[in-house]
């Protein structure tokens, strides 16, 4: 069973990660071009940031700025390290997104994870599943995206209010 979602309390980073993109997520796996090379991205509404797999970044000969921070997976005690950052041009559905920031991680669940930082460039993201039920619309609250794990946007509470 894949791990899903993570929260790192000091940087308020939320991440959904799996050991491999299972068949049930193929509807959110999309072909993209990164710096004119075709790869696959997972559109992940529960990931607050976007990431690229370290092996893929190396294969694409991306310039990586070193950094080090932990990302903790909320469904377990598993954590992984973001080892760097790079900026790339992404082409998706004939739209070019320039200088997209991607965290670099080992053993990503796909080539690239497109998180909320990327998705929020749009007024909405539509993913068609082909199910028999009518569409399900998840509204926003005070113009903030709703996600079952958006606790990352909640400020730290005071322990002893005064």
Image (cartoon, grey):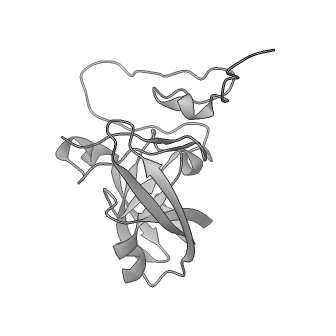
The front one of 80 and 98 is 80
Could you tell me residue 102's position as x and y percent? Answer: 53, 63
Residue lying at the far right of the rendered structure: 162
Could you tell me residue 22's position as x and y percent? Answer: 20, 47
Q: Is residue 21 visible?
A: yes
Q: Is residue 5 above or below residue 64?
A: above
Q: Is residue 9 above or below residue 93?
A: above
Q: Residue at x 48, y 62 (%)?
A: 82
Could you tell me residue 83's position as x and y percent? Answer: 48, 68
Direction from residue 30 to residue 151 in the image, left or right:
right
Q: Residue at x 44, y 60 (%)?
A: 81
The front one of 91 and 119 is 119
Q: Quadrant of the N terminus?
A: top left
Direction from residue 59 to residue 123 in the image, left or right:
right
Which quadrant of the view contains residue 67?
Answer: bottom right
Direction from residue 28 to residue 140 in the image, left or right:
right
């Amino acid at each position: 069973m894949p791990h899903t979602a993570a929260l790192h309390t000091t940087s308020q980073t939320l991440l959904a990660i799996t050991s491999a993109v299972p068949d049930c997520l193929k509807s959110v796996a999309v072909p993209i071009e990164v710096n004119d090379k075709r790869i696959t991205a997972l559109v992940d509404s529960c990931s607050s940031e976007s990431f690229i797999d370290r092996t893929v970044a190396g294969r694409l000969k991306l310039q990586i700025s070193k950094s080090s921070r932990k990302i903790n997976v909320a469904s377990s005690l598993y954590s992984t390290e973001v080892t760097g950052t790079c900026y790339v041009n992404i082409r998706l559905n004939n739209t070019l997104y320039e200088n997209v920031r991607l965290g670099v991680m080992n053993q990503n669940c796909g080539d690239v994870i497109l998180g909320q930082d990327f998705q929020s460039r749009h007024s909405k993201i539509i993913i068609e599943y082909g199910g028999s039920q009518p569409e399900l619309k998840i509204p926003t609250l005070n113009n903030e995206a709703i996600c079952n794990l958006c606790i990352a946007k909640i400020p730290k509470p005071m322990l002893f209010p005064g």
